């Protein structure tokens, strides 16, 4: 690609943060090997670590510069509210404990307990000392609840206490991080300058900046804190799950910026109010906050649907008027290589996640210190006022901002709050996608997994990567800055970072030839680009319903009506899986078709009035071997395959013909069975992509089926009891009355076939015969095992619903049906 075609050549330069050094790297920057040095020499920071053995006194002197605080290391003149002073934690705890919201909750809980004791006869109203004893008992109960709340607060809050500690912590974390990511952390100079201006204004107004980053690695916590420290911004308090609060490490993180919260609050109203009071206190005081919008780490490489827990607390702080305003800053964090991907693959294939502990932390940390994983790219979206956003949304909903308390629990307010949360959550995800940088490893992974054949030559790999870079930029995406370094060098560096465990090279051939060794793990990097092309992928997969039938060009054309219906179906199917453009289906479909036509991938036939009547592949695309069209199909096919697998597994949830009682199946067991079915079908040749057995994707499919009423889910009041599901009677497949075998017909079968129409063609799948016989028979057999287990004497009681649960399920089903009708959105 020529420089004239490079749309980002005038974009702001990157800043490279590597240990003590910040380096300006404009687009023309080339990392030239120094004379007399090997090109793979370690950076200066690495040499500092190495000098400990050869020059211990000099090494200790460097450490002392941080601990004593010399120059910028002192962290004295940062932008933001004062932090890191003795007594900070005590002051914060007192502020939380004195919050009116918490005090009112403690009083309410004390009154409830007192009422129970009175009903049980512990306090008698005919006692002449009743009033005195009641007052004393109430005071004792309140005191006990306050003690519990005080302990919870101390365990939860971040403890910014010591400047020498944070200086030493910065030095330690920098050394560790840059030994793994040897090319440091890269940020945009333009974005950093803008963020500093916003931070100065926020400090003046005593407002908090709420950083909402994407979450792919535990390194996300560290990189955010290092950036803020090095660039002179007040460190944010990072919301973290208490699964990381294990001995030594937990205390270290808490003093470096972590606040610990439970993974699940249950029905603990005291704890819920405590979290709200703490967030109120921080936002009222103007302290910065960091919260991962996706909740947990993404194991698949793409953004997860937003989680609304902490966002809900933040929103309530503003809706109630307890906080005037806060600044939201979406953040994208991208990696050349994510440290945890190998562990993610293990989890996604069904191996339970291990609980975090100190031994694994130390062994895992030491194992990556000698790696060279490239760099970390962090990008900051333009910050925006949360108050202004709320007011704009309320105005769109014909609500006058500030005229009523929207935190009052009424059905209307609850629905309005959920709508605000949802739109806000998806806006943040969209903002993150807008500033995300595509790394060389993502380019390589995407190309390798979207080509036909066993491998690809180096020249062809470079050609397709160059094409992909152009497409990313044409879609408004960003590609990581590497100056005018030759593409071949950038790709070679990416291949080195990915390593031979992910990408192999065949030796002894006419030219270097590369192939995907671990397609499952490599899909993590491919998924980092899919958000840019999701519209093209859906259109291509919808066209495939005709293309797969073969024949001449005219026979492979699809009518606009049929294309629109299939795009609508797939969009609805993947509603919880991808972030779609906000223009609406019609506008987005017209735009996507126009872009594909301009790229000469498709040819549009129009009526005399100019309306699109049919769509087919262009002659240029056919002559090119369908390579660009296939690229878009290959992006989405693994997800279509996973949805088909999940839908097929539902066949097994049709109760056996001899079963007279209604039994409910454990959700986890049903999803495990779907995964087992997928592994079996893959090895038998009926599943093209092993990625389709991805546990996270199957879980999302089941969640989508629940939203559509295909399955009903019931949760027990007992938190230890498993969540169970049942296939809706409307969706159960019929059975042969004589043999009891499932019959390939009915609503669920039509649904499976609708998904299958966009599946990649493959061996044994020229038609639906193998699915309607062998595959359904296998799914039914696995389902029968689930019902046998549920009917066993030791679990039968849990598998049957009580009258109260059955009544609640009926109520929820009816409410969901009304909601879907009122939404007016496309449904499956």
Image (tube, helix red, strand yellow):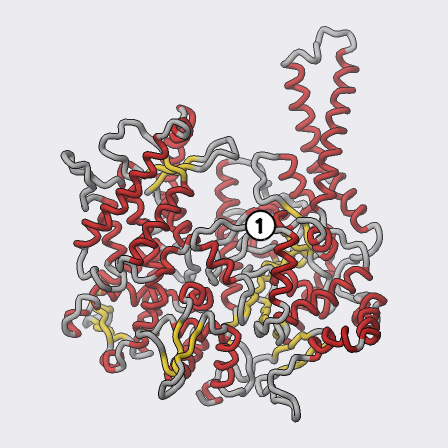
Residue pushed farthest bottom?
A: 35
Residue 541, image x, y percentages = 29, 64
Classify 10 Å Cα crowding around label 1: few (below 14), some (14-19), many (20 and above): some
Residue 777, image x, y percentages = 23, 46
Could you say whether the residue bearing mark 1 is in a helix, strand or loop? helix
Q: Is residue 800 left or right of residue 499?
A: left
**Visible residue check, residue 789:** yes
* 159 or 781: nearer the viewer: 781
Residue found at x 57% / y 72%: 373
**Visible residue check, residue 531:** no
Residue found at x 51% / y 58%: 343
Residue found at x 71% / y 36%: 149
Question: Does residue 785 lie above or below 57 as drawn?
Answer: above
Q: Which residue is mark 1?
A: 311
Residue found at x 72% / y 6%: 126
Q: Quadrant of the N terminus?
A: bottom left
Displayed quadrant of residue 679: bottom left
* 554 or 509: nearer the viewer: 509
Question: Does residue 378 lie above or below 754 as drawn?
Answer: below
Displayed quadrant of residue 663: top left
Residue 55, image x, y percentages = 80, 77
Q: Is residue 550 left or right of residue 129?
A: left
Residue 418, image x, y percentages = 50, 45
* 304 or 586: nearer the viewer: 304
Question: Does residue 592 lie above or below 660 as drawn?
Answer: below
């Amino acid at each position: 690609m020529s420089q004239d075609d490079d749309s980002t050549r005038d974009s702001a330069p990157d800043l490279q943060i590597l240990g003590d050094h910040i380096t300006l790297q404009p687009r023309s920057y080339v990392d030239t090997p120094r004379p007399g040095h090997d090109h793979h020499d370690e950076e200066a920071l690495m040499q500092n670590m190495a000098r400990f053995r050869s020059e211990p006194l000099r090494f200790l002197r460097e450490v002392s510069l941080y601990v004593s605080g010399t120059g910028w290391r002192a962290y004295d003149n940062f932008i933001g509210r004062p932090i890191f002073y003795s007594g900070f934690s005590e002051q914060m705890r007192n502020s939380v404990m004195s919050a009116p919201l918490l005090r009112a909750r403690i009083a309410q809980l004390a009154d409830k307990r007192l009422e129970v004791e009175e009903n049980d006869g512990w306090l008698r109203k005919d006692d002449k000392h009743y009033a005195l004893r009641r007052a004393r008992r109430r005071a004792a109960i309140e005191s006990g609840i306050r003690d519990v709340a005080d302990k919870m607060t101390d365990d939860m809050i971040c403890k910014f206490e010591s400047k020498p500690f944070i200086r030493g912590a910065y030095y330690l974390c920098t050394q560790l991080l840059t030994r793994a990511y040897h090319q440091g952390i890269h940020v945009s100079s333009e974005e950093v300058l803008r963020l500093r201006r916003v931070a100065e204004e926020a400090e003046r107004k005593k407002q908090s900046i709420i950083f909402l980053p994407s979450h792919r690695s535990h390194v996300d916590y560290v990189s955010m804190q290092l950036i803020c420290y090095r660039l002179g911004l007040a460190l944010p308090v990072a919301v973290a799950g208490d699964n990381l609060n294990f001995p030594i490490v937990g205390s270290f993180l808490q003093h470096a910026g972590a606040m610990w919260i439970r993974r699940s609050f249950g029905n603990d109203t005291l704890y819920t109010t405590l979290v709200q009071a703490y967030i109120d206190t921080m936002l009222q005081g103007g302290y910065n906050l960091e919260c991962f919008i996706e909740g947990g780490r993404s194991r698949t490489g793409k953004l997860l649907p937003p989680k609304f827990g902490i966002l809900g607390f933040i929103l309530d702080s503003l809706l109630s008027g307890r906080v005037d305003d806060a600044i939201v800053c979406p953040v994208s964090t991208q990696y050349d290589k994510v440290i945890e991907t190998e562990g993610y693959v293990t989890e996604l294939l069904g191996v339970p996640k291990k609980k975090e502990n100190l031994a694994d932390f130390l062994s895992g940390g030491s194992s990556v210190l000698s790696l060279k994983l490239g760099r970390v790219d962090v990008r900051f979206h333009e910050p925006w006022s949360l108050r202004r956003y709320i007011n704009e949304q309320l105005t769109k909903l014909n609500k006058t901002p500030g005229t009523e308390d929207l935190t009052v629990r009424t059905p209307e307010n609850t629905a309005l709050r959920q709508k605000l949360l949802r739109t806000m959550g998806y806006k943040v995800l969209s903002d993150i996608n807008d500033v995300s940088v595509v790394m060389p490893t993502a380019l390589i992974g995407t190309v390798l997994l979207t080509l036909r054949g066993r491998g690809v030559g180096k020249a062809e790999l470079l050609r397709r990567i160059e094409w992909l870079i152009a497409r990313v930029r044409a879609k408004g995406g960003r590609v990581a800055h590497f100056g005018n370094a030759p593409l071949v060098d950038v790709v070679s560096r990416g291949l080195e970072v990915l390593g031979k465990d992910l990408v192999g090279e065949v030796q002894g051939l006419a030219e270097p030839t590369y192939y995907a060794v671990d397609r499952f793990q490599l899909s993590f990097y491919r998924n980092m680009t899919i958000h840019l092309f999701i519209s093209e992928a859906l259109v291509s997969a919808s066209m495939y319903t005709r293309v797969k039938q073969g024949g001449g060009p005219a026979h492979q054309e699809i009518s606009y009506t049929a294309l629109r219906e299939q795009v609508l179906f797939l969009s609805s199917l993947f509603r919880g899986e991808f972030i779609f453009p906000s223009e609406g289906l019609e506008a987005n479909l017209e735009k996507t078709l126009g872009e594909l036509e301009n790229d000469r991938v498709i040819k549009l036939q129009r009526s005399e009035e100019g309306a699109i009547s049919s769509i087919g592949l262009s002659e240029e695309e056919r002559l090119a071997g369908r390579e660009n069209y296939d690229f878009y199909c290959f992006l989405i096919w693994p997800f279509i395959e996973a949805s088909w697998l999940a839908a097929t597994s539902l066949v097994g949830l049709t109760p056996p013909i001899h079963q007279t009682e209604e039994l409910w199946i454990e959700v986890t067991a049903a999803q495990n069975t779907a995964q087992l079915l997928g592994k079996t079908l893959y090895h038998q040749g009926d599943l093209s992509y092993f990625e389709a057995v991805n546990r996270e994707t199957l879980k999302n499919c089941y969640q989508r089926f629940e939203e559509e009423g295909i399955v009903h889910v019931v949760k027990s009041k007992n938190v230890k009891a498993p969540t169970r599901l049942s296939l809706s009677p409307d969706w159960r497949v019929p059975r042969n009355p004589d043999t009891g075998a499932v019959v390939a017909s009915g609503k669920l079968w039509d649904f499976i076939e609708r998904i299958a129409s966009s599946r990649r063609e493959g061996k044994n799948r020229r038609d639906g015969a193998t699915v309607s016989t062998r595959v359904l028979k296998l799914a039914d057999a696995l389902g029968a095992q689930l019902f046998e287990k549920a009917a066993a004497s030791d679990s039968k009681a849990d598998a049957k619903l009580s009258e109260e649960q059955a009544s609640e399920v009926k109520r929820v089903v009816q409410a969901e049906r009304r909601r879907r009708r009122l939404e007016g959105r496309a449904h499956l």
